Amino acid sequence: MAPFTSHELRKGFSSFATGVTVITCLDAQNNPHGITISSFNTVSLEPPLILWSLKKHSRLMPYFEVGHMQLIHVLERSQEAMAMHFATVKDNQFFNIPHTVAASGLTQINHCIAYYECETVSVHTGGDHNIIVAKVHNLKHDPAGQPLIFAHSKFGGIDFS
């Protein structure tokens, strides 16, 4: 096989369709932050574990270290604008974003099809990213909801009816 460029690898990876999530957290001053992640994956039912990846040098990485809480939101098919909004880290991210504050204090974006309240249990280095393994403490989901899907660098959905 011929060698490939990182651009070609990225294009090849885009053939794998994924769901789209926004993960919210709190900084040391309890200010909320959110980031769009498509690297979410289930790991285990017993104990209930998930994993996701974040660039090693992300300014949000300190808020996802072991022991920190996060709220993972599975976006609904109509929430493409929400995915794009949280794709870049910015100040005052939740201005004009419909949300509530969960009992845990984490920011919960309204109208998502699933929510996983988690605690980071381990962080592993994986190239230029950290792989975050988190234990699910609480969940809520809408079994009739239609998830937002990302593949070939485009958003879409699947009709499950």
Image (cartoon, helix red, strand yellow):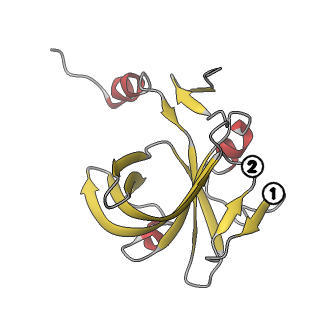
Q: Earlier in the sequence, mark 1 or mark 2?
A: 1
Q: In the rendering, at what x and y percent does residue 99 appear?
A: 77, 61
* Residue at position x 30%, y 67% in the image: 122
Which of the 4 quarters of the picture holds residue 8?
Answer: top left
| Left or right placement of residue 110 versus residue 57 in this view | right
> Which residue lies most toward the top here?
1
Please give the count of numbered marks on the rendered protein: 2
Q: Is residue 148 above or below residue 130?
A: above
Q: Is residue 38 above or below residue 63?
A: above
Q: Secondary structure at mark 1?
A: loop
Q: Amino acid at mark 1?
A: Pro
* Residue at position x 64%, y 51% in the image: 86
Quick one: 120 or 114, which is closer to the camera? 114
Q: In the rendering, at what x and y percent does residue 105 appear?
A: 65, 77
Badge number at residue 149: none
Q: What residue does disc 2 label?
A: 111
Q: What residue does disc 1 label?
A: 98
Q: Is residue 78 above or below residue 82?
A: above
Tag 1–tag 2 contact (CB < 8 Å): yes
* Residue at position x 38%, y 28% in the image: 13
Q: Amino acid at mark 2?
A: His
